Amino acid sequence: METVARSDPAADAPAASNDMTLIYRQSRWTRLTHWLWAIALFFMLLSGLQIFNARPQLYIGKESGFGYNNTVFAIGAENTDQGPRGYTDVFGRRFDTTGVLGWSGPPGQETSRAFPSWATIPSYYDLGTARVVHFFFAWVLSATLLVWLVAGLINGHVRRDLAPRLDDLRRLPRDIVDHAKLKFHHTREYNTLQKMAYGGVLFVLLPLMIITGLAMSPS
């Protein structure tokens, strides 16, 4: 981490002008990779919603299709006495989501689509472009994650700042209670919950997302 010196704003007092506050922040390389991840995840999310629009249904089981009844989540539109309405099905329970999910668009130009145009990349229906955008930023995410991991192992960042120690595990119950009471301790080191959350995202969720995403990658 970098150490940044910041002077006290009360500069009218001579003694205060020499008072320096140390602020610890991540290295430039860590900040760069995290911003790249944020940008990549943004484009992956919105292009992923466009891909989902091609068939807005989720299933349980190894097989799916029109002849199966194993849908657990679906977004669509239907004609009713009040006109077209959008709906969202969750485990067989239907919710009216007209205007946001299933049926949306400018007044008089509504169309049937799962996620609205303002929430997808591109805004118009184009599965091919959405897949290109999605997988391009997926590779950006994968490459920067790998580079960050290698650099973190070499410079000791992973071992020093992220790996939970025995003392961290002993403090875990107290950290949980403090967070439940909204009592946050701002120090240079991550607390136990921060280490577990950080590690869970970086070493479990992101790799799992990449591995499962490779199953969709064009050959």
Image (tube, grey):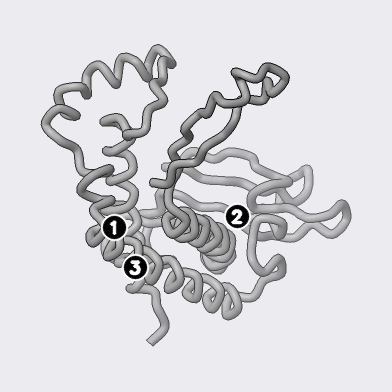
- The tag on residue 147 is 3
Can the viewer see residue 57 in this picture? no
Instruction: Please state if 156 lies on the left or on the right of 12 as rendered.
Output: left
Residue 117, x across and y down, in percent: 71, 60
Of tags 3 and 2, the one toward the viewer is 3
Question: Is the residue marked by circle 1 packed among few (<14), some (14-19), or many (20+) residues within 10 Å?
Answer: some
Q: Earlier in the sequence, mark 3 or mark 2?
A: 2
Residue drawn at (54%, 24%) of the image: 19
The residues tagged by marks 2 and 1 sit, at their Cα atoms, a distance apart of 45 Å
Q: State the residue position of label 2.
A: 76
State which tag comes first along the sequence, 2 or 1: 2
Q: Which residue in the protein does label 1 denote?
A: 152
- At label 1, the amino acid type is Gly
Mark 2 crowdedness (10 Å alpha carbons): few <14, some 14-19, many ≥20 = many
Quarter of the image with the C terminus is: bottom left
How many marks can you see? 3
Viewer-side label of 2, 1: 1
Pick the front one: 191 or 203? 191
Q: In the visual, does 177 lie left or right of 125?
A: left
